[in-house]
Image (spheres, coloured by chain):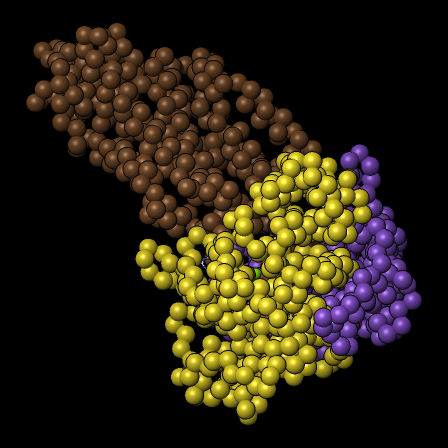
Chain colours: A brown, B purple, C yellow
Amino acid sequence: MSPTTEITTPTQSHASAEHANLKPLKLLRQTLGRDRLAAAGAAIIVVVIVLAVFGQWLAPFPDQGMGSTNASARNLAPNALNWLGTDQLGRDVLSRIIMGANPALTISATVVAAAALIGIPLGAVAGYCGGWLDETLMRVTEVFQAFPPLLLAMVTVAILGPSLTNAGIALAISWWPWYARLVRAEARSLRERSYVEAARAMGIPQLLIITRHVLRNCMTPILVQATVDIGTVILAAGSLAFIGLGTQPPLPDWGLMVAEGRGLIFSSWWIATFPGLAIFLAVLGFNLLGDSLRDLLDPRQVKR
Amino acid sequence: MTNVLSLEKIVKTFPHHKRVFTAVDDVSLRIKEGTVYGLVGESGSGKSTLARCAMQLMRPTSGRTIFEGDDLGKLTPRALRNVRSRMGMVLQNPVASLNPRMTIGASVAEPLRAHTTLKGQALQSKIEDLLDEVGLGAGHAHRLPHQLSGGQCQRVGIARALATSPRLLILDEPTSALDVSVQAQILNLLQDLQQQKGLTYLLISHDLDVVRYLSDEVAVMKSGKIVESGAAERIFTDPQHDYTRTLLEAAPGHKASPAVGSHTLSAPNTQGSN
Amino acid sequence: MTHVLTIRDLNVEFIDRGKVTNRPVRGIDLNVSAGEILGLVGETGCGKSLTGLAALGILPRGARRTGKVTMGGDPLQPSSEPDSPAAIVFQNPGTAFNPVFTLGRQLSDVLSRHRQISRSDSKSEVLRHLGLVGLPDPERVFLSYPHQLSGGMLQRAMIAMALLRQPRLLILDEPTTALDVTVARQILVLIDELRHEFGFGVLLISHNLGIIRDVCDRVAVLYAGRVIETGTVDAVMNNPRHPYTRGLLGALPAGRSHGERLSAIPGSVPGNLLSITGCAFMNRCPHAVIDCSFTDPFLTRNGSDQAVACIKEDEL
Ligand SMILES: Nc1ncnc2c1ncn2[C@@H]1O[C@H](COP(=O)(O)OP(=O)(O)O)[C@@H](O)[C@H]1O
Ligand SMILES: Nc1ncnc2c1ncn2[C@@H]1O[C@H](COP(=O)(O)OP(=O)(O)O)[C@@H](O)[C@H]1O
Ligand code: SF4
Ligand SMILES: [Mg+2]
Ligand SMILES: [Mg+2]
C-alpha cells in the first residue's frame, strides 16, 4: 500500500480560480470570447430563441404557420412570396419553420428541465450518501439506460397516446438517468473535498451539505450537459414526430414537416429539406456551444 | 486537570485488495484541558484517520472516543452534530477547505446558523468579530476564497472553527501548505488564541519543529501505532524509541554547522521506508 | 573553478496578445560552479521555478525570456535538445513518468536519445545508473511500472534518468517537497555524494531553509523575481543582512520555546510585479523608509562572500 502523499508545496496565493469554480455566466463569456465555433453555436441558439418567442410576428404567413391551408398555392418552389416554397397543402414553408421553433424549443427545454429536476436530487443523494441507496439507484438507472431512448419513448407514447406532451413525458423518462449518473459521479468526488469534510466537522445538517456544498459545485458540468441535451432532445422530439408519435398535424413541427415532405423529396425537395436543415442547425448550435464549454472545463483536453 | 478528549484503543481498518489494511492500530491517548497535544509522524502513518475517528467523521472499527464525558460512538446523529459545535477542526489545505462558491462571510456564518439563533445584524457583527479575532478585516467577508492568499484562507478556517466557541480544536497539518513566513503568522495566532481562551489543541503535523514549538505533550506515530509519547521537551531532547531518533536526525536544518562541501550529512537508516 | 552555468540579467515576461502581463523574473544574475550546489530559496511565487526553467529554455507557453544564459562559455541549449549539458528534476515524482511504460523502457529511451549507445549496452548502462542512485534492486526497478514504486524510489529513478545524460548541470526543483523527511534526507545525501563523484554543478530550488542550509554551498535568496541576498550558506544563514532573509529565518519555529513569538513577515508576496517601483519588499519591510519607494536597490557586495540588495544595508 503506498501512502497518500500529503506534503505539498505552499499554496500559490494568487492562483487563479480553476475553471470548475467559474460562475456559469463568466464561463459562457470566456468561451464565446476565445472560441469562434462556440460563438457560431451561440448565434444559432439566439436565432432559434428569437424565432421561438417572436415567431408569430416574424412569420410572413402566421396563420399558415399554424396550419391553415391554401389550396391555390400547393407545392410551389421557392419564389419571391414564399422564400422557401410551399408544401402540399399550400402552406408557406418558411412560416411553418419559424412557427415550429417554439414547440421545438419548448419541448426540449421542458424535457431537459424535467429530467434534471428528477435526476439531480436523486444523483446527489445517492452520490453523497453512498451505500445501498446508491446501489439501488444505480441499478434502476442502468435498467432505464439499457433501452434506447427512442424505443422507451415509443413504448410510453404507445401507452399514453401520441401528442407533443406525451412525447415530452416519454423523453423525460428516458433522460433523467443521465442526469442522475452525472450528478452522482460529481457528488462522489465532491464528497471527498476538504470543504465538505469541514462542513461535516462543524455539524452542518446533511441536507444543507448536499445542497450548499455538493450541488452548488456541480452546476457547471450540469449546465454543459443540459446545453448539449437541448439539441439532442430537439432531434429526438423531431424523430418522434417523424414517426407520428409526437406533434400531430396540422401543428407546425420540424420533424413532422420532414415526414410530410419525404414522399415528395424528388419533385418538391424544399418541403422536407428546409425543416431538416432547421433541425440540423439547431442541434449543431447547441452541440457546438456545449462542446466548447466542456473543452474549457476539462483541463486534460489542451487546445492546440 | 480533566481530560477533554480521551481516545481508548482506537482501531480503524480499511478494506484493501480483499484484505484488511489497519490505518490506526490500537491507539490510546488523553488530552488534558488547556494543553496542546502534538501528534507527529510521516505521511500515511494514520494521523488524519485518527483525527477523523476522534471527531467521529469516521466510525472507528473499535475503541471509544470520550469527549467532555460523552462517549461519541453512542450518540445519535443529531446529538453528535450538537457535540461538534463544541469541537472545531482546521484542515491542511486552507483554500480547498473553503467552498469556492461561498463568500468568506457565508462560510463563517455556516456553523453559527447551524448551532446558534443569531440572525441579521447580530449575526453580521459576530462574523466581523470572528474575522477580527483572527486578524482579518471585516472587508474580507465579501470575498471568495480564491481571492485570498493561503494564509488568509487558513485564518478563515480558524475563525470558522472558533465560531461556536469550542473548547477543543483539532488542527490537522494547519501550516503544512504554507510558506514559513505565513506559517509563523498562523502559529502566532494559534498560540495567542490558545493562551487567551485556554483552548485545548490536538495538533497534527509532520513538521517536528512546529510540533515542538506549540506542544506540551507529544506522541510519535508510525504505521498506525504510537511508538512513543510523553512530555514534549523529553521527546525531543531524550528520545527513547529508535524511530523517534530517526525522525529527529532526518529533520532538515538541524545540523549545528551546515554541511558545506563535505559529507557531514548522514542518511538515516529507515528499513522498509522505500 | 569553472562555471557550469552563468546567468546574466535574466528576465521572464508573460505576454498575452502582444501585451506584457507580468514580469515574474526581473534581472537575475547567478553562477553555478562545477561540483557546487547553489540553493535558490524564497517564498512560493518568488520566481524560483521560472528561473530554473528559463535557464534551460523550457518556459511555459506565453512566457518570454531575455538575458544571457551560458554554460562554460556556450549558450545553453534547451534541455530537450539531445546535446544539452543540463538536466532537470521536478517536484512530483509520481507524475513525471509515463504510467504505461516500464521505467527501464523510459530510461533506455532517454539514453538512446541523448547518447549513441547500442541496445544491449543501453540496458546495462541504465541498470548501472539505477544502482548508482541507491535503488536496492535495479533489475526489479527496470521492469517496474511507476505505480509499483514508492515516491522516494521514483525520485531516485528521476535522478538516475537525469544522470544518464551525463549533465554538467543538474537543476532540482523542490526535489524532496513531496517526500517524507527520512526519504528526503536520503535523496539529499545522494545528491551531495553524486556531485562530488561526477563533478556536476547543482541548482537546488527549495522553499525550505533547512534543506538549503543542510546541503548547499552557496545560496541566492529570491524575492519578487530578484536575488536580494546571496553568498555562502554560512554567511547568509548565520549573518543575514537583508530584512527579507532575516524575516524568513526569524519565522522558523526551530529552537523557539513555548510562548515566544515568531517574527512573522506580515503580508504576502506581490502577485503582479509590473507596476513595482523601488524596493519590492517595501510593503512588508520593518525598516522601510521613504527612499525605498524610489530607489531600486541592486546587489552590493559586502566583503567577499555576501551581496545584499537593500539601500539601508549599512545601518541594519
Ligand atoms: N478512506 C480511506 N480508505 C482507504 N484507505 C485510507 C482511507 N483514509 C486513509 N487511508 C489509508 O490509511 C493510511 C493512513 O492515512 P492518513 O491517516 O491520511 O495518514 P496521515 O494523515 O498520517 O498522512 C494511509 O495508508 C491511507 O492510504
Ligand atoms: N503560466 C503562468 N502564467 C502567468 N504567470 C505565471 C505563470 N507561471 C508562473 N507565473 C507567475 O510567476 C511567478 C513565479 O512563479 P514560480 O517561478 O512558479 O514561483 P516559485 O517556483 O518561486 O514558487 C508567480 O507568482 C506567477 O505569478
Ligand atoms: S530597500 Fe528599504 S524596503 Fe527594501 S529591504 Fe531595504 S530597507 Fe526594506
Ligand atoms: Mg494527514
Ligand atoms: Mg516552484
- The answer to whether residue C165 of the structure is visible from this angle is yes
Would you place residue C212 above or below residue B50 in this image?
A: below
**Horizontal and vertical percent position of residue C64:** 41, 59
Identity of the residue drawn at 57% across and 67% down: C3
Residue in front for this viewpoint, C273 or C201: C201
Residue in front for this viewpoint, A205 or A171: A171
C28 lies left or right of C252: left
Q: Residue furthest left?
A: A80
Would you place residue B154 above or below residue A23 in this image?
A: below
Identity of the residue drawn at 83% across and 50% down: B272
Identity of the residue drawn at 47% across and 80% down: C298
**Horizontal and vertical percent position of residue A144:** 55, 22
A240 lies left or right of B113: left
C168 lies left or right of A80: right
The quarter in which the N terminus of chain B is drawn is bottom right
The answer to which image quadrant residue A261 occupies is top left
C224 lies left or right of C107: left
Identity of the residue drawn at 36% across and 37% down: A289
Residue in front for this viewpoint, B143 or B259: B259
The answer to which image quadrant residue C307 occupies is bottom right
- The answer to whether residue A189 of the structure is visible from this angle is no
Residue in front for this viewpoint, C209 or B78: C209
**Horizontal and vertical percent position of residue B70:** 81, 58
**Horizontal and vertical percent position of residue B196:** 70, 79
